[in-house]
Image: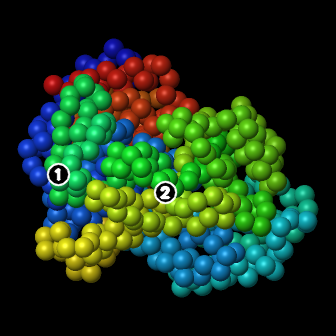
Amino acid sequence: MTTLQSVPALGTHPASGSLPSRAETRDQLSRATYDLLVIGGGILGISTAWHAAQSGLRVALVDAGDFAGATSSASSKLLHGGLRYLQTGAVKLVAENHFERRAVSREVAPHLANPLTFYLPVYKGGPHGAAKLGAGVFAYSALSAFGDGVGHVISPAKAQRDVPELRTDDLKAVAVYRDDQMNDARMALMTVRAAVDAGAVVLNHAAVTGLRFTRGRVTGAELKDSTDGTEFGVDARLVLNATGPWVDHLRKMEDPNAAPSIRLSKGAHLVLKRTRPWRAALATPIDKYRITFALPWEDMLLLGTTDEEYEGDPADVSVTEADTAQILDEAAFSIKDQQLSRDLITYSFAGLRVLPGGPGDTSKAKRETVVTEGRGGMLSVAGGKWTTFRHIGRTVMNKLAALPGHPLAEDMEPMNRLPRKLPLPGIANPNAVAHRLLIDGPAPGPRMAPDTARHLATHYGSLAFDIARLANENPGLAERVHPDAPEIWAQVAYARDHEWAETADDVLRRRTTLTIRGLATDDVREGVEMLLADRD
């Protein structure tokens, strides 16, 4: 393992082509008047900024924390059609979700998404029978035009070969379907990069302290850079509130009398070390509407999720002991005890789903996206799901084009004239990238480890070659950050210079998987902080 003393002495000063400094970005934001200021760097705000920049608008995007720093990096990591929506007869919604899922995983970001087989176990006395689930997964696959195969039913013995920890007591049959999964934080960061490539100006760790008004209309925001306390402002013809769980907080800045527009549902997850390899995921019905997932993800096992109303401060959301007990108890319906030992838990996280509207059962609520206009002309977008992030961006843009008076319509290209499936940066076949990384290593030095090559290929696509060049130029950066993880120090330098990483958590929790693996030790954290500080 790289010693702390060697990390800052690696010659890791920013490379050419690095991002502008925060001071330069603040100056750029302060001097211009933007067509659109997006407040909120979750996937809804990021996607809107990406589409708005593609349309030709002058776009700024700011976030009080890190990009995807809250809900957008606390999802179940799935791109899915929404099997449970068939319960409510939402056939059109499932078909639309499938279209978006397949577009992202096959054409927009095949380097960041991968197909995943799901098994739905049917137990004696369970909420659904084998015939019903078999028909359900067949219909589900039909709504994706059978592009991922035909949903069907298999025997418990065959399922256990792929999921060795599957509980087989009273197991009658197993229904099979397919969806896709991703690393949500990496997908969000690549979308930020796409927005910047299209012309957007972005800044994280910049909190809104107030809104700017001109004759009663919202025309910008006052901000404070949390890294050094610098205060500055941004002028814009239109402001979009995409702050997720904080959407009503910003609406009250616009109008102190604004009524609540959303409710929040907490979803908690656990990450565990796997006792044996899994080649499929489990989706176990708990009741008529709820499913608990057990997903092989990043060489670990992701369990969840909960779904309960949350009324506290969004900044305080966390996984409680009750959440942990519930997740493990529900997982025990279909998973053997040895895989559910608390000693295997490496990390837990909770996110908040934003559900537009009034009270009701959160587990039955649709993940709809709603765009509203406030008294001061600020638009607020709330709700939605990861799978449809591109569709949400287009929906907001269509709303902008249709605003009374059409203030931006003349300056933007209509959505129907833009490419429908524009790829994210780094698009490439990850298998080919991993192969190249393995054979193209420096002649005098050691070859890249297979797990590192695979990790880089599936988190950066062809941009992995930029990281490999850093490692080739400086052998110290080719060393692992922690011996039990695939990440190398070159990724930390790359995150600093090209991915807006400002804090150790930005790197350890979102640019890499070290925190989720339970490997963000004091030594690792100190080394990352030293490398981040070496900016000049």
Q: Which mark is residue 214?
A: 1
The residue that appears at 67% across and 50% down in the rendered structure is 308
- Side (left or right) of 102 relative to 362: left
How packed mark 2 is, by other alpha carbons closer than 10 Å (few <14, some 14-19, many 20 or more), is some
Amino acid carrying mark 1 in the image: Thr
Q: Nearer the viewer, residue 55 or 401?
A: 401
Image location (x, y in percent) of residue 181:
52, 59
* Residue tagged 2: 261
Judge whether 348 appears above or below 143 on screen: above
Q: Write the residue at 67% across / 56% down.
A: 293
Determine whether 494 is above or below 264 in the image.
above
Q: In which quadrant of the rendered view does residue 234 lie?
A: top left
Asked whether residue 105 is in view, the answer is: no
The amino acid pointed to by label 2 is Ser
Across and down, in percent, residue 284 comes to: 74, 60
Give the x, y percent position of residue 399.
31, 71
Label 2 near label 1: C-beta < 8 Å? no
* Location of residue 413 in the rendering, given as x and y in whole percent from the top left corner: 18, 74
Q: Is residue 368 left or right of residue 120?
A: left
Q: Residue at x 76, y 50 (%)?
A: 331
Residue at position x 86%, y 65% from top?
Answer: 126
Q: Is residue 283 above or below residue 416?
A: above
